[in-house]
Amino acid sequence: MVDINSLLTHEFKRNIGLLNEEEQKQLLRSRAAVAGAGGVGGLHLLTLARLGIGNFTIADPDVFEDVNINRQYGAFRSTFGRNKAEALANMVKDINPSADIKLFTEGISSANIDAFLQDADIFIDGIDFFEIEARRLLFRKAREKNIYAITAAPLGFGATLQTFAPDGMTFDDYFGINDNMPQVEKLAAFAAGLAPHPYHIKYMDLSKVSLTAKTGPALALSCTLCASLAATEAIRVLTGKDKVKPVPHYTQIDLLRNKYKHGYIWGGGKNPAQKLKKWIILKKAGSSAA
């Protein structure tokens, strides 16, 4: 039996003052479903656990390896070869032993997605950028189940944030994606919607980005920023502390260029400017080799 009052008095006492006691109790009672436990998802989990989210459902079929060291906060020499979801679950338990955790080490599919989202109060996207079909499935199911869905993407020296309300614009409508598009076009549309202002283009070596090879650079600092954005949004959704502004609203930050933008894309993916950005991305990164 979880003693919420004890957790409030001890482990999460220093949250009080920025959160009130009722807000903290609400977080301790909440369940976050997090798909992906790598660069972004892993840090989402650890940040939310220290924030006081009390219950988690974690999915990731991958294992840690040396290429993850530069940005994935669960990647250590000691975790190489271990399933990412299991490794992060152990870290969450080390923060809060009373946390209830459900694991999906086989990843997400149409066969288990209902079970993955069962009892979730919020869904947070931490899967690989290139897994567009799994992402579409997750956001569609979250909407069907009346669950808010959050995605925060690392981009250059910054991050982006988009929140999807169950009664708001759909994932496909915001990004301008449909079933008839080739995979690479879907990825280009996704990239354009994540970053309406491509601040990173000024300094990123686009020869290291390939939508077809599914490769691109990412930094640990950007993953950290993603976790801060997503966790703050989770507080808004779960406690009502502040107004949630779902898509077509978006937030974009670039620390290297000192840029911050909270904007609104009229029409989402149907916006002519977004369509143009999609085709530019497709031309520059659709066939380049990393």
Image (cartoon, rainbow, N blue to C red):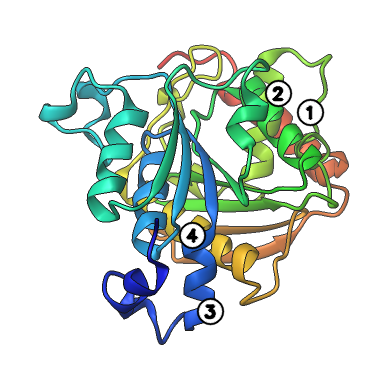
Residue 101 lies, with reference to residue 177, above or below; the image says below
Give the mark toward the camera: 1 or 3: 3
Give the mark toward the camera: 2 or 4: 4
Q: Residue furthest bottom?
A: 17
Please report whichever mark, 1 or 4, sits nearer to the chain's N-terminal start: 1
At a point 51% along the width and 42% down the height, the residue shown is 201
Residue for badge 1: 177
Please report whichever mark, 2 or 4, sits nearer to the chain's N-terminal start: 2
**Label 3's element?**
helix
Contact, mark 1 vs mark 3 (Cβ under 8 Å): no
Instruction: Place residue 102 in its image quadrant.
Output: top left
Contact, mark 1 vs mark 2 (Cβ under 8 Å): yes
Q: What mark, if any, has residue 186 been given in the picture?
A: 2
Please report whichever mark, 2 or 3, sits nearer to the chain's N-terminal start: 3
Position of the N terminus, as image quadrant, is: bottom left
Q: What mark, if any, has residue 224 been given in the picture?
A: none
Residue for badge 3: 22
Give the mark toward the camera: 2 or 3: 3
At a point 83% along the width and 47% down the height, the residue shown is 169
Q: Nearer the viewer, residue 40 or 63?
A: 63
Q: Is residue 282 visible?
A: no
Residue for badge 4: 231
Residue 65 lies, with reference to residue 76, above or below; the image says above
Instruction: Place residue 10 in its image quadrant.
Output: bottom left
